[in-house]
Amino acid sequence: MGYRLVNSLLTLVLVSFVSFAAVEFAPGDPAEMLLGGASKELSAEALARVRAAHGLNQPMWKRYVGWLKLVAGGNLGVSLRTNRNVTAEFAARIPVTSAVAFGALSLATLAGLSLGVFAVIYEGRAVDHAIRAVVVACHSVPAFLIGLLLIYLCSFKLGWLPLYGVGGGSGLVLPVLTLGGIMGLSLARVVRNALLEAVHEEYFLAALGKGLSYPQAVLRHGLRNSLTLVVSYLGMRFAGLLGGVVLIESVFSLPGMGSYILEAILGRDYPVIQAYMLFFCAVVLAANLLADLLVRGIDPRAAVAGIH
Amino acid sequence: MPRIAYAGGTIVVLFLLVAVLGDSVAPYPAELTDYGQILAQPSLRHPMGTDHLGRDLLSRLMAGTRTTLGLGLLVAVLSSALALAIGALCGFAGGWLDASLMRLVDALLALPGFLLAVCFLGLFGGGVFQLVLYLVLIGWAQLARIVRNEVAVARNLDFITANTAAGYSTARNLFRHVLPAVLPSVLVLLMNTLVGDIFAIVSLSFLGLGISPQIPEWGTTLFDARSFFLASPWLFAFPSALIGALTLGLHLLADGLREHLDKKRFLFAVEEINLLAGTASACGSETA
Amino acid sequence: MRLRTGLALLAGALLLQAACSGNRRPSGKLVIGVNGSLNLGSNNPVLIQRNANVWEALTELDDSLTAQPQLAESWQATSDGRQWRLRLKRGVRFHDGAALSAPLVAANVLRLKDHPELDYYSTFVNLASAAIDDEFTVRLVFSRPMVDLPNKVGHYFAGIFSPAAFGPDGKLGKPIGSGPYVFAESRIGQYDRVTAFDQYHGGRPYFREIEFRIIPDPVVRLMSLIRGDIDMIAHHGGVPAPYLDLLRNKPGIVVASQDVAITHYLLFNCSRRPFLKMECRDAFSRSLDRAGLVERILQGAGSPARDFLVDRASRWNRGRFSVQPDASGQVKQELKACAGSSAVVLLLSQSDLSAWGYRHVADYLADYFSRLGVPVRVEALEGGAWQKATQDGRYDITLYPLSTPTGTPELLIRRLAFSAGMRIRSIGNTTHFLSGQIDSLFTEALEAPDAATQERGFNHVLDLLAKEQPFVPLYHERYYYAYRRGLAGVHVDPFLKLDLGRLHWEEPHR
């Protein structure tokens, strides 16, 4: 565990440097953006003044260290476009994104476990095949296309759900359904495969011998043993999930972190992009550590075997 | 081989044929505009309708197959090759080299690759080279770890140990015996990676961050179609259907192949591959 | 059994629909769908866009881009054009209760003078003093003639604010203006809200509250209007042209258009082949099919450019360009001779691509010229990279949007032809044609002692530019907006400002 922690911290330092350097070597000039970007004519003196005022003329390593200090104190910098604190901007958008991400995770866990169990109980029968077919079908179309179809049907044609925004929570239904549904289906596949291996284990056969019915045995014994797999699988997919959030938020017009990064990119809001990379890498690293801890909590043997 | 592998293989081969033959089988040149036929509905003349410049959508999607599938393959092959090289090196050499490279792999695996690609494409602009570079950079690590584990297992197989004892060189062992032994699993992984890469390319283009707008590509077509979504839904429906069909084919082929190779005991670290099976590995299918 | 389940599901669905589509708003509130926040942040001199109707300026440009009174009632210049006396409107209150007065205007003028980074079109660079003649008269003295001052104090960054609104750094804490609406709240990524200002000098506004709801996707914005979630689509982005027919078929929705003071230019790289020679630029320019571009690709969301500035800027409109292509075989020959065998590189900025629909324009140009035998390669770069590439001359042609904020060609010339302006940043900086001549003519025109001389001067520069063609106008922006039938008093000005103070529901609607 100590190794994991140290590795994560080292990764984070590396990421901080990469995100800082990336923005540093990007072709645009932050001083110009500070003065309103391409929308007007700038004099060389004005640019020089802004550079001095924002410390842009200091050597790169000095600014990097200064930035790290700020970030360590919880200050992610100031947006070039809005002049607002990036931390505040993030704080306004994170609730939306985390609602989508955690909603999707919960739905995925629920759907994945139940479908997986169903598939095993009815192994080789119609239900199993149907689940498999749905899994493959849903995995064959990118989530954003499914999302667009859902908006058109449920929001526009039927008017059941809002077309855009959070809408007091109802606006999150479709995004969560899209992301969580797809993730749940792939999880169902993983659970099914894991359970199918478990049913051939001795302890499982012993449980059947004690008089438990097959479904009971699957639920009581098989499932518990596949939990570690579920957790480590979800941990593994977490980064991908956050990537999916960018597209889903853009499709569903949600004011979260995903649509924010697209705005920042188009507006060349460099401090935001910088902070964004660092923040999300930190979140994903933390999520991976958490998944690790959970796996160990559920199954101490994993600490030895090293599920990763 | 299971039947699904043949079904999937047929689909994939069809798409490959379209990608290779491209222009010569398309009803119209992909760039041909017809201003009398702007945003025309599907008809006999234009089975999939036309776009905002009156270009035949079917022909554009056929040309786009080459771009999308070609780039996807390029990324998948490059990341697999990189993964194979580094994985084999680590698995065979072991020691500090293995430890440090695997630490790098750990670091890369713990990062949100797709988000980083979005940021980098945004900062430095899109283009074929950039797109391939970023996708390979975020895609190789997962494969490399699996290859390394397999190589490490294969290396300790009895006959390799015996070979070493008999005085055969390390290189000979690696290339003659160990690598061929891990190739089947790399093949399965490559196909899963390919799906993820295609999804990633399409998604990035859909966000307007992909390759040049002039090159026909499925995601770019979708990006353009987004502004005609309500009035001309076919512009959206057909590219989506094609993406679905190709991915379905790849999934079926990968699944079938995996089952077949698994039965024949060609795969070592089956558990890890199972974890990836049915889901796109490199970027995650949730990505798209 | 199956029937009962079906019925229950149906009932549930209907209930849900009833609950969700309850879009009857209180009649005092209007919701306008916009593509992004109107809140520009405090780095911007006015903090909130002019469209919010929160602040006003001294003057306002009317439909013919001529200055009309807003906060200034009348104005008068001395014969040398160096001194301006502005008489202010009486009885104007700001949102914090402050009254419009000469000292208040002087404080605003000095704010921009002291903080040139907030003075977007360099209006007050040459200001010598701002004197207070009486409570409602302010006298602005410039160190050089400034004959078009009334035009320069009415643009979209020229707001007049209560002195309580800005601090010593000149930045606004809150946009306390004198407009019909008071800025209430911005919710990041969701909406900006303004509320009625009952002491507004133009009369009490009808709507108690107006919400600018942020819906970035134009199609979703459209669906929201059709479904009745919003009352109006206005501001940048407007209604995309492909949907005009669809909307016109909806009886409950009105579609209208306005020609706005924005022109899209095609810029040539004059520092390298193929557009090094004037003859080649001319051949390319003459073969442009402006009318075809507007009709086929923009589907009416624009008008073909006959001159550098929009048609309504009639003082500068001489019809210097043709909207029809020169179809003679000769121009084709010339074009081919110039271009040789290599492709012409059309370089675009990623941000313009998404903001202005340049993607389709580029596609069209590429196709059009390849039919003429000159292949065009379209390349898109990230905004900063595009700027570098254009400055370094790594392009052949590019597209560039520019508005006419003061109703004169000054910004256009300064940005694209004046060498001092170009050296700093502009894309035109590779065009060293005639720069000495244009520079001196431009400076002369700027310092002209009267409007007629200035008009002649600017027109002279435009004539030269039309002959040398380092850049040519392609089309002017036309903008479509839509609203629910029953909304009255809808007026959008050439700078996209919707006059919120005059909006109301027609009587039967209530």
Image (cartoon, rainbow, N blue to C red):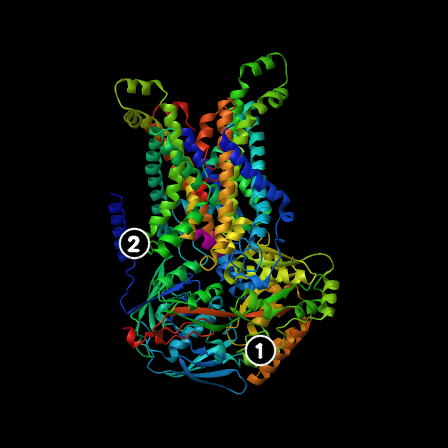
Pointer 1 local density, CA inside 10 Å: few below 14, some 14–19, many at least 20: many
Q: Nearer the viewer, residue C433 or C281?
A: C281
- Report x, y in % for residue B199: 50, 43
User: Residue B111: in sight, yes or no?
Assistant: yes
What is the secondary structure assignment of the residue under circle 2?
helix
**In this rendering, would B68 be left or right of A250?**
right
Left or right: residue C187 compared with residue C262: left
Report x, y in % for residue C376.
65, 58
**As rendered, which of B148 and C128 lies closer to the eye?**
B148
**Circle 2 marks a residue in which chain?**
A
* Prevailing secondary structure class for the magenta stretch in the rendered image: helix
At label 1, which amino acid type do we have?
Leu
Residue C248 belongs to the span the image colors magenta: no
- Please, what is the three-letter code of the amino acid marked with disc 2? Gly
Return the chain for callout 1. Answer: C
Question: Residue A168 — which label?
Answer: 2
Where, by quadrant of the figure, is residue A186 drawn? Answer: top left
What range of the chain is rendered magenta? A260-270
For the residues marked 2 and 1, what is the alpha-carbon distance in whole angstroms? 55 Å
Which residue matches tag 1?
C446
* Residue A268 showing in the rendered view: no
